[in-house]
Amino acid sequence: MSSETITVSRRSDIGSNASKRLRAKGQVPAILYGHGEQNVNLTVKADTIRGVINHGTKLLSLTGDITDMAVLRQVQWDTYGIDVLHVDFHRVSASEAVEVTLPVKLHGEAPGTGEGGQLVFQTHELTIECPASSIPDYIEVSIAGLHLGQSIHAGEVKLPEGSTMVTSHSVIVVQCIKHVEVADDDVAAGGAEPELIRKETPAKEAE
């Protein structure tokens, strides 16, 4: 994953009222910390930070009033999960090992689906430790050897060189279970269905 450069500004006014004024101007209050250095209160444009979140960028090159390298450590959202209220940046060096939580993407076709099985996603994200300069966009999990009745645990996932799994190795990522039709009465009674992974069929015509 390559780094993304964003512009930040120092801020001297802190507190909830000052933060509200910043957000009203399209700015998001932020803080930069880590490496035993002094914390720095910052602001960043709301559109900029939303772009970072949407792109899934983990490694950031900060420019503007300061010059530093950081990872986006925490995002605070409003009650409705629409507007970003505050973000935390954590200083890193290119060779430093950092913990990041990444989305899981399945690769291949599980033979268990041809044995009467259905894939069930149990974990959508995994946390790994890796060099800050080599943060992948996602964790690829091969299901090419997954048969009916089998599961893939976090500890079995092959990671990029130099990375280690932080998520408990016993956590189930995906499993292939016997396909069972759920009766409408069971669903209406409040029975929760597992998240099934279905094959997508191509659209007949692009809109």
Image (cartoon, rainbow, N blue to C red):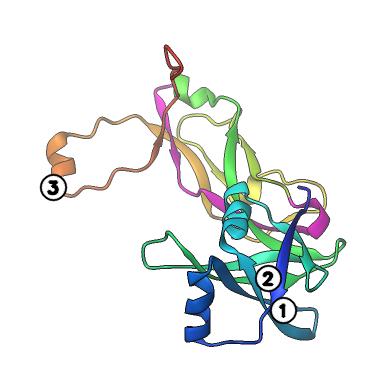
Q: Residue at x 80, y 79 (%)?
A: 35
Disc 2 + disc 1, Cβ < 8 Å: yes
Q: Which residue is mark 2?
A: 89
Q: Nearer the viewer, residue 44 or 91?
A: 44
Q: Are marks 2 and 3 in contact (CB under 8 Å)?
A: no
Label 2 environment density (alpha carbons within 10 Å; few <14, some 14–19, many ≥20):
many
Residue 108, above or below 122: above
Spatial CA distance of label 3 from label 1 is: 49 Å
Report the amino acid beneath label 3: Ala
Residue 13 drawn above or below residue 7: below
- Residue position marked by numbered label 1 in the rendering: 33
Query: In the image, residue 97 lies at what x, y percent?
Result: 79, 64
Amino acid bearing label 1: Tyr
User: Which percent across, then down, holds residue 13?
Assistant: 60, 87
Question: Nearest the camera: 201 or 21?
Answer: 21
What is the number of callouts on the image?
A: 3
Q: Sequence order check: which comes first, mark 2 or mark 1? A: 1
- Specify the segment rendered in magenta: 115-135
